[in-house]
Image: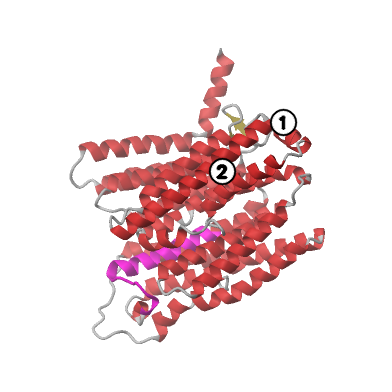
Amino acid sequence: MREPIFHVGNHILQVIPEIILVVSICITLLIGLFIKKNKSLLLASVTALALLLAFCFIVFNWPSKPQEIFSGTLRADDFSAFFRLLFLAGGLFTLFISLQKESATEYVILIQAIVVGACLVAMSMHFATVLVSLELVSLSGYVLAGFAFNKQSSEGSLKYFLMGTVATACLVYGVSLIYGIAGTLHFSSTQFVDVLLQSHSILVLIAAFLILSAILFKLSAVPFHLWAPDVYQSAPTPVVAFLSVVPKLAGLVLLIKIILAFNLFGQASVDWRVMIAVISILSIVVGNLSALAQTNPKRMLAYSSIAQAGFLLAGVATLDLAGIHATLFYAVVFLIMNLLTFTALHFFERWKELPSMADFSGLGRVAFIPALALVTGLIALTGLPPTAGFTAKLLVFSSLWSAWTDSGLTMMLILFIVGLLNTVVALYFYLKIPYYLFLKETPPGTASIKISITGNLLLLILVVAIIWLFLNPGLLMGWINRITFVL
């Protein structure tokens, strides 16, 4: 009796961060029900404390070796722990910039729910837990997208929900086909690999494409990107900042696992490197070319996010350890530069509406720190020095070049060339806003934009982080290189 209890206790220990957040959600709900006045600060404090405790627990209890928990449905390892830290950091920073006085209870609950779901996605090794945790992320995201409480926001949220429902249906149907063929939902098990190696049914490919379609929807990769521009434009900017990083990176970590599972140790009948490379190319090209025509800054950043998904996929397309390590570095940089860009944009929007890029004219002279932060974020998204965006793209391109020289696969070279050319294309639309900020005249009567000391400090921290990772990427990359992921 003692041994089973010990094992259950050890399993629970691995999900303490998620338990902390669930307890925090319950406390937050009680605060919302019973405290009627001046509860915003209390809500923010409880949520921030929970996120910090969960973050610290993972750091100080870093997995020394992979451990399967709850009958193998979840696995605690350094790969999942890495992404769990990113999700918690994304949630914590979003909380600092976005707590709303109206419906604050629901707001922080949804943020925590998405973080919990994303953390469970990172640990999932079973299609049942994938479905449940991914839906926790999705349903909370649909509600958050409508938090501007206006007609446009409701339409964007509804479009997101309808398309997300179709993606979920594809995922459920694909999983049911796989279960019928393999007889197991453990996609890391030897039974899964053995049965799929022996099966020559076209249903395996159909199931794989259905499952990957649902995951690519989370990444807003082409051709599953149509929801992103409307949601990014209509949702509150802090919500957009959060949705652009946490659910997207949750989709990324799941894609890495699933694509390695269907690759069957390189013995699959389909070359999944080519498939992922094609999606990466389409996402980069469509995202960048569509962004060129945009005048609304948030729609431009939406299409930019689609192109960034393509660059995230580029590292995965190599299906080797170097490519995945480059992708992990890119994921960290992507989190920082997206939060930096949207936070700076949020501070500008709190002062005045900015429906077009021309509305930024001369604002760099009246709000230097937010303008500097916004320009730094856009330069990082372009992939230029002295920002870590340059280092991240360099690592991805290096992994593509190595994959081409090692395998001779032409698609890796094509992806390499397309990525380089589109970095030049991105330069045009990313630098539109800096052009208006500093090279256009300030409209007469424009007052100085007053940003709180805390707001300026948050922006400066992110600016320093994105530049420091360019000057000293070895510390982060050294940590990432020690992450050994085996499905």
Q: Main secondary structure of the magenta part?
A: helix
User: Could you tell me which secondary element the residue under label 2 belongs to?
Assistant: helix
Q: Nearer the viewer, residue 156 or 465?
A: 156
Q: Quadrant of the C terminus?
A: top right
Residue drawn at (58%, 43%) of the image: 80
Disc 1 target residue = 191
Q: Nearer the viewer, residue 151 or 465?
A: 151
Which disc number belongs to residue 81? 2
User: Looking at numbered disc 2 in the image, what kind of residue is underneath it?
Assistant: Ala
Q: CA distance from mark 1 to mark 2?
A: 26 Å
Q: Quadrant of residue 361?
A: bottom left
Q: Is residue 284 left or right of residue 110?
A: right
- The percent position of residue 93, horizontal first and vertical second, equals 41, 54
Mark 1 is surrounded, within 10 Å at the Cα level, by few (under 14), some (14 to 19) or many (20 or more) other residues, namely: some
- The percent position of residue 111, horizontal first and vertical second, equals 39, 47
From the image, state whether disc 1 or disc 2 is nearer to you: 1
161 shown above or below 4: below
User: Looking at numbered disc 1 in the image, what kind of residue is underneath it?
Assistant: Gln
Most extreme residue toward the front is 202
- The percent position of residue 282, horizontal first and vertical second, equals 61, 64
Residue drawn at (30%, 57%) of the image: 148
481 shown above or below 23: below
Residue drawn at (53%, 78%) of the image: 428
- Read off the magenta span: 333-358
Q: Residue 367 magenta-drawn?
A: no
